């Protein structure tokens, strides 16, 4: 029944939100009672758009192909890029329906032919090219990494994407060294917190963090200076460092690209690694978003020449899944696991969510309510409080206006620090 | 008399070339017999334009100001950027008449007030913000470096600009590491040769050099692969390395910017450090050149994001003289002098020229006839052969058409290897 519902929704996009919400609750109950060993629970994105395109349903369990590992998933990471996927606001999006999600942790359940390096029962974390938000995942062995003994599944699901991205941006793209300064947007987010921790592994690095005021208390120890995201941060940074900064890590884009370039010291590097400003209202047409995406101001190479500046882009997902970066990422992961084992980095988990709570979790990222990582915990049941809240939160999510600053319902969400 | 001549030329830009050439010869003879201790010989650029704007004249000798060192010059470096200065094809050019030249070597003759770290008689090399092509130069102490005992004045004049630029591009902008690959245009030029030597200081670095066929024999041992500058180097490189290269160093610009970006591996860096393609015919209007300079294709930051690429610009002169990079360059110079003392790098000197031969020297760079550095040797007298050639070479230089490939008169130029 769950599969049928998903297919119907894919065709009948004009269904009212109320009907979908009712279906969602019924569907979730049916799924919970499933015992078919060939099926698994998974989050499905029925089509590109708002939160109402997401549901939990049953899918046929995948089996590992040549060179793949099958993982019984324990926890999945939820990232801003998942919101962009949901809106279809990415380059060459796959055709829905699809299972979202790019990273998970769990236990190796079986191994494909000619697949070496892992054994059944290994605790692992993995990158997946979609399909992570499910009870079972298969992925090529090159994207699978053994977890340290002391690392929890929740930590592991919070580790791969954010720490690898932060490490590669700081050390392979921007060449962070002793005594430098780094400005990071969304300092309270999961990449921001990874950046702050990795910066503290290098002597005498100054971190300028930008975050909503509501997060300042929670993250003030992780950065050197902290600014409100609504403040004129260019002026604020220049008051402290008139020359500017050595590295700007920007996940927002738009006007922040020009501001970031302007803030660079000579030989400084601006790194664009996301475009969260492009995700606004939940139901905003993704065509209009795609348009604004490409309207970002272009940069003349001679301007960089005259000003001695570096402009870079970084997309870990493209590196992994389109550009064959698996071996390079493996080397980085080895370094990161060494830092983890030395106690120098530790993922900050914002909150755990059941698969059925994925809409509320997405809304929390969208509202920038999180400090650290949101985790989909496969074994968690939806809290009664969340089930009651479901419709209400999704309504907020359907508004055309950016609900930024509207934090009324955040306090009722369960989260751990 | 020499000063008067220069001023006259500044006003009377319509003077015929023949008249100027005659003046030049007479002037040079007068200068050679000068014994006034308050005057010095210097190359003067009377106005922006072709080779005929250059002459040797007498100027009042400068005295060191607070924080400056006065250097009795032995040798000066001649760089492609000097051709761009001559054409006025730089950002915010100073008003002519001016003495060109950005680097020299020599002996400390006196020291300004509150100037520490040097003594009279020290053998030094120095950066100068113009004014280098003269018998005496004053420059701030931050731009002066002691020469190693075994370094000749010619080597020193070939060292500063090119090795610092090559080092900073490779190690501070592009982050060269073991196993990487580097493509360098003008591999036979003085920066190209410095790049090749510095690459060989890192294990297992592949260097793809692009140079005129005439230089291939001379430089084939300095690079891993060598391509003709008129060949389709993108295809040639991809035959050897289908993935592309990690670093592209481009001093040409124009169409090579797009080609360079296209040749990058994921996380690769394209560095634009010059625009020698913008210097074509000797008398081409510098306004039309300035126009083509700005017509270079702009780059969308999202393209870099999706492709995982880095685009950088590097101008050592701007870093030094506009952006306060003196301390940073000093650190780099210390590392380079250490490499020099270990015998791991050694400047390649193409040829030595008298001040009076500056036009012929410029023509040689313009024709891309050099392998390594051209040096103005203050104590060298113009060779009789060169004096006879002067008019002839300058005529070639006045042609509207790019004389590329017209190497007829090169064989008669004196040069050392």
Image (cartoon, coloured by chain):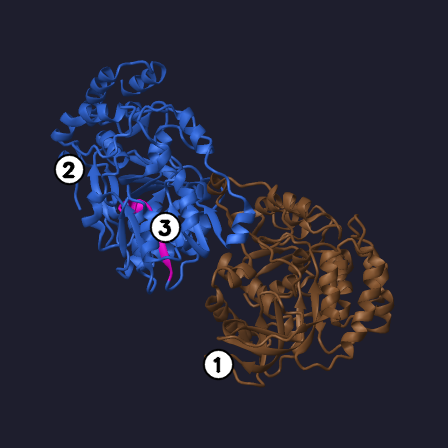
Chain colours: A blue, B brown
Circle 2 sits on which residue?
Answer: A414
The mark closer to the camera, 1 or 2, is 1
Report the side of B277 relative to A57 (left or right).
Answer: right
Circle 3 sits on which residue?
Answer: A166
Q: Position of residue A277 (x, y in %)?
A: 35, 36
Report in which chain the residue with disc 2 lies.
Answer: A
Q: Position of residue B366 (x, y in %)?
A: 74, 57
Compared with A49, A381 (above or below) is below
Determine whether the residue tagged by mark 2 lies in a helix, strand or loop: loop
Q: Position of residue A263 (x, y in %)?
A: 40, 51
Residue drawn at (60%, 76%) of the image: B343
Residue B117's label in the rendered image is 1
Q: Find out whether residue A396 is within the magenta segment.
A: no
Q: Find out whether residue A189 is within the magenta segment.
A: yes
Report the side of A65 relative to B46 (left or right).
Answer: left
Callouts 2 and 3 in the same chain: yes
Residue B341's label in the rendered image is none
Q: How many marks?
A: 3
* Marks 3 and 1 in Cβ contact (< 8 Å): no
Mark 2: give few (<14), some (14-19) or many (20+) Cα within 10 Å: few
Residue drawn at (25%, 54%) of the image: A222
In terms of depth relative to the viewer, which is nearer, A133 or B269? B269
Distance CA(mark 1)–CA(mark 2) = 65 Å
Determine whether the residue tagged by mark 1 lies in a helix, strand or loop: loop
Report in which chain the residue with disc 3 lies.
Answer: A
The mark closer to the camera, 3 or 1, is 1
Report the side of B355 relative to B204 (left or right).
Answer: right
Distance CA(mark 3)–CA(mark 1) = 42 Å
Q: Quadrant of the N terminus of chain A?
A: top left
């Amino acid at each position: 029944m769950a599969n049928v519902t998903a297919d119907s929704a894919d065709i009948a996009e004009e269904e009212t939100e109320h009907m979908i919400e009712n279906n969602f609750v019924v569907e979730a109950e049916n799924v919970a009672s499933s015992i078919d060993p060939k099926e698994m629970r998974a989050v499905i994105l029925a089509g590109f758009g708002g939160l109402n395109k997401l549901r939990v349903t049953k899918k046929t369990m995948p089996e590992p192909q040549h060179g793949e590992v099958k993982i019984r998933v324990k926890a999945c990471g939820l990232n801003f890029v998942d919101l962009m996927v949901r809106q279809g606001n990415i380059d060459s999006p796959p055709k829905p329906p699809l299972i979202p999600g790019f990273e998970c942790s769990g236990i190796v359940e079986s191994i494909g032919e000619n697949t070496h390096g892992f054994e059944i029962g290994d605790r692992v974390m993995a990158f997946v090219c979609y399909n992570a938000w499910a009870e079972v995942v298969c992925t090529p062995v090159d994207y699978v990494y053994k977890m340290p003994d002391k690392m929890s599944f929740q930590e592991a699901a919070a580790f791969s994407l954010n720490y690898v991205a932060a490490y590669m941006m700081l050390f392979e793209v921007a060449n962070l060294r002793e005594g430098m300064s780094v400005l990071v947007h969304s300092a309270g987010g999961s990449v921001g917190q990874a950046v702050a921790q990795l910066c503290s592994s290098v002597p005498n690095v100054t971190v300028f963090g930008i975050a909503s005021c509501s997060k300042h208390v929670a993250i003030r120890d992780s950065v050197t200076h902290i600014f409100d995201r609504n403040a004129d941060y260019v002026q604020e940074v220049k008051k402290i460092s008139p020359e500017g900064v050595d590295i700007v890590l920007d996940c927002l884009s738009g006007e922040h690209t020009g501001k970031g370039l302007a803030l660079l010291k000579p030989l400084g590097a601006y790194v664009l690694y996301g475009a969260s400003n492009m995700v606004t209202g939940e139901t905003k047409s993704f065509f209009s978003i795609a348009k604004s995406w490409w309207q970002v101001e272009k940069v003349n190479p001679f301007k960089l020449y005259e000003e001695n500046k570096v402009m870079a882009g970084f997309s870990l997902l493209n590196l992994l899944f389109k550009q064959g970066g698996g071996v390079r990422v493996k080397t980085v992961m080895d370094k990161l696991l060494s830092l983890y084992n030395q106690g120098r980095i530790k993922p900050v988990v914002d909150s755990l969510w059941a698969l059925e709570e994925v809409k509320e979790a997405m809304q929390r990222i969208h509202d920038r309510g999180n400090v650290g990582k949101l985790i989909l915990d496969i074994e968690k049941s939806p809290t009664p409080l969340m089930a009651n809240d479901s419709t209400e939160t999704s309504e907020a999510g359907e508004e055309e206006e950016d609900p930024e600053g509207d934090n009324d319902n955040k306090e009722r969400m369960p989260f751990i620090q």
